[in-house]
């Protein structure tokens, strides 16, 4: 059975489809990722079955997870890459940015410190330590999503 086909399982016919929540939340997206990974296909002599509950593939939760991820903005290739990746806790950004790049943050002008050259930074270079501060390193901005790319 294909992903878009109607199931012939009696339980599926009685219960119907799991509804997609109208306003998607980050928790819905996390649960959908977990549903498509945990309820992935496993080959059996009688055909593919759900790896988690042995129902005909795709089971109700796998179909629900795919619908939620499509509503969130992922395409089929990206969802298949999530399933192949196999980590049910992989992070999908919310809101999903199709280009995968975050907008650049404007750089703040660096003012010279009264202590001399210690506070000066070359133009276009981020300081490794916050000036006049605690000595903690500055984390680089997150510019790429942390979910697997479809090949």
Image: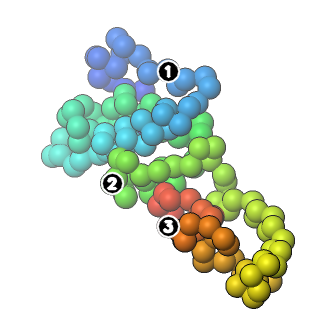
Q: State whether residue 2 appears in this view.
A: no
How far across and how far down the image is residue 37, in percent?
Answer: 35, 46
| Mark 1 lies on residue | 19
SS category of the residue bearing label 2: loop
Q: Residue at x 80, y 83 (%)?
A: 123
The residue singled out by tag 2 in the image is 86
Q: Is residue 4 above or below residue 133?
A: above
Kindly indicate the quadrant of the structure image that contains residue 17: top left
| Viewer-proximal residue among 119 and 151 | 119
Upstream in sequence: badge 1 or badge 2: 1
Please report whichever mark, 1 or 3, sits nearer to the chain's N-terminal start.
1
- In front here: 73 or 105? 105
Q: Position of residue 19 (x, y in %)?
A: 49, 20
Element assignment for label 1: loop
- Tell me if 33 is positioned left or right of 114 in this view: left
| Disc number for residue 151 | 3
Crowd class of label 3 (few under 14; some 14 to 19; many from 20; radius 10 Å)? few
Q: Nearer the viewer, mark 2 or mark 3?
A: 2
The spot of residue 85 in percent (x, y) is: 37, 58
Q: CB under 8 Å between callouts 1 and 2?
A: no
Locate residue 120 relative to residue 34 in the image: left or right.
right
Residue at the image point whose x is 81% and y is 74% from the top: 110
Label 1 – label 2 distance at C-alpha = 25 Å
The answer to whether mark 2 and mark 3 are in CB contact below 8 A is no
């Amino acid at each position: 059975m294909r992903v878009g086909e109607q199931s012939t399982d009696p339980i599926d016919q009685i219960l119907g489809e799991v509804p997609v929540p109208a306003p998607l939340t980050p928790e819905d997206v996390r649960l959908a990722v977990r549903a498509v990974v945990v309820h992935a296909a496993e080959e059996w002599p009688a055909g593919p079955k759900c790896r988690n509950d042995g129902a005909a593939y795709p089971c109700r939760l796998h179909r629900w997870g795919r619908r939620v991820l499509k509503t969130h903005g992922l395409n089929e290739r990206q969802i298949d890459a999530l399933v192949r990746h196999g980590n049910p806790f992989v992070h999908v950004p919310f809101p999903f940015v199709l280009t995968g790049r975050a907008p650049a943050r404007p750089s703040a002008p660096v003012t010279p410190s009264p202590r001399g050259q210690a506070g000066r930074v070359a133009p276009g270079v981020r300081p490794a330590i916050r000036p006049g501060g605690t000595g903690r390193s500055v984390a680089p901005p997150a510019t790429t999503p942390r979910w697997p790319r479809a090949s």
